[in-house]
Image (spheres, helix red, strand yellow):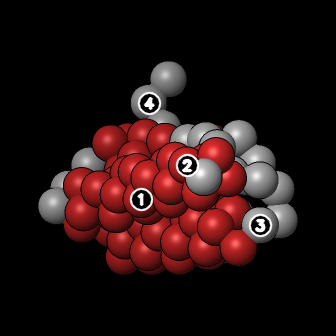
């Protein structure tokens, strides 16, 4: 019973994490402001990273991280279209270049 309770909590954490990532993608797609989009990318990039809410390497951890990477890629693609630049796929480069200081 106790193990099942912990698993339920981790599933709810994963759902919350994935919801945040999707929200950052949605906000990015609705914006044309690169500084704002960079802040959404930064939030998705650092929001409860691997092992912080999930057991490192667990199935849920891998699923959450896969959604994070996919969300980051979608946001970066949006930034490429808006900026006309290609800084690669590394979120840090886009965040450093466009995030408001």
Residue sitting at x 43%, y 40%? 39
Q: Which mark is residue 100?
A: 4
Percent position of residue 70, x then y: 53, 76
Q: Secondary structure at mark 1?
A: helix
Residues at badges 2 and 4 in contact (C-beta under 8 Å)? no
Percent position of residue 96, x then y: 62, 42
Q: Is residue 83 visible?
A: no
Q: CA distance from mark 4 to mark 3?
A: 35 Å
Residues at badges 4 and 3 in contact (C-beta under 8 Å)? no
Q: Earlier in the sequence, mark 2 or mark 1?
A: 2
Q: Secondary structure at mark 4?
A: loop
Q: Secondary structure at mark 2?
A: helix
Q: Secondary structure at mark 3?
A: loop
Q: CA distance from mark 2 to mark 4?
A: 42 Å
Question: Which of label 4 and label 3 is nearer to you?
Answer: 3
Residue sitting at x 44%, y 30%? 100
Q: Earlier in the sequence, mark 4 or mark 3?
A: 3
Q: Earlier in the sequence, mark 2 or mark 3?
A: 2
Q: CA distance from mark 2 to mark 1?
A: 15 Å
Question: Which of label 2 and label 1 is nearer to you?
Answer: 2
Find the residue positioned furthest to the right. Answer: 57
Q: Which residue is the site of mark 1? A: 15
Q: CA distance from mark 1 to mark 4?
A: 29 Å
Q: Which mark is residue 5?
A: 2
């Amino acid at each position: 019973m106790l193990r099942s309770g912990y698993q339920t909590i981790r599933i709810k954490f994963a759902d919350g994490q994935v919801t945040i990532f999707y929200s950052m993608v949605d906000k990015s797609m609705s914006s044309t402001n690169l500084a704002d989009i960079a802040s959404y990318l930064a939030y998705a990039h650092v929001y409860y990273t691997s092992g912080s809410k999930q057991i490192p390497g667990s199935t849920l951890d891998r699923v959450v991280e896969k959604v994070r990477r996919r969300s980051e890629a979608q946001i970066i693609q949006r930034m490429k279209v808006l900026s006309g630049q290609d800084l690669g796929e590394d979120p840090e480069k886009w965040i450093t270049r466009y995030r408001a200081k």
